[in-house]
Image (cartoon, rainbow, N blue to C red):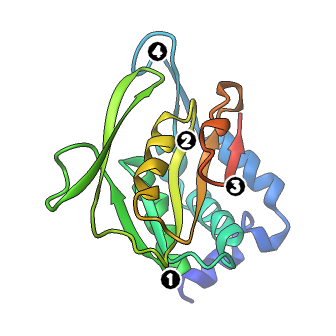
Amino acid sequence: MNNSDKGNNSPLTPSSGGRGAGIEKVIASIRNVPDFPKPGILFKDISTALKDAEVLRFIADELYEYYKDKGITKVVGVESRGFVLGSILAYKLGAGFVLLRKPGKLPSETYRYEYDLEYGSDALEIHKDAIEEDDVVLLHDDLLATGGSASAALKLISMFNPKSVLVSFMIELEFLNGRPRLEETQDIHSLVKF
């Protein structure tokens, strides 16, 4: 039995009808860390979800099911938690994977975009040869909060003028109203909403 066969037998897979139970298990597996990275922030730690093989498989399968027929050719993962599920999605979708990194981490020529986020400011960079105009791009990050980093990522991706851009999150904090900042795309999907 290969790994994909194991995934299809999991009680949490989308095809088994256990989606509701699976989503509840994902929610239960996310750790809340108060006052991180600064006082007043309740950090949603996905490492506790990712370390559970069954939960990780369910998350990856759910996201794949949503995007499998959308013609994705490149998945762009935002440093660093966006790399985990982003690379899994790229593999499952048969797409290339592009790293969107903090400044100074990419070795070749880059585009850079600076932005504000809920607890400070930052910048993202992408290689200038990462995306082509005929690409259908899926931007993936672990969490949508105020939309600062996702908006910056979309600004960088738009420099390439790809055919279309879709956006994926594992978690969306709806009360922070980040979705309206993502005007560059019409397809925004979040697996879990708080």
- For the residues carrying marks 4 and 2, which lies nearer the camera in this image? 2
**Residue 170, above or below 11:** above
Q: Which residue is mark 4?
A: 35
- For the residues carrying marks 2 and 3, which lies nearer the camera in this image? 3
Q: Earlier in the sequence, mark 4 or mark 2?
A: 4
Query: What is the quadrant of the N terminus in the image?
Result: bottom right
Q: Which residue is mark 1?
A: 94
Q: Which residue is mark 2?
A: 143
- For the residues carrying marks 1 and 4, which lies nearer the camera in this image? 1
Q: Nearer the viewer, residue 91 or 3?
A: 91
Please name the amino acid that badge 2 sits on: Leu
SS for dot 3: loop
Please name the amino acid that badge 3 sits on: Gln
Q: Nearer the viewer, residue 137 or 6?
A: 137
SS for dot 2: strand
Asked if the residues shown at circle 4 and circle 3 are in contact, with their CB atoms under 8 angstroms apart, the answer is no
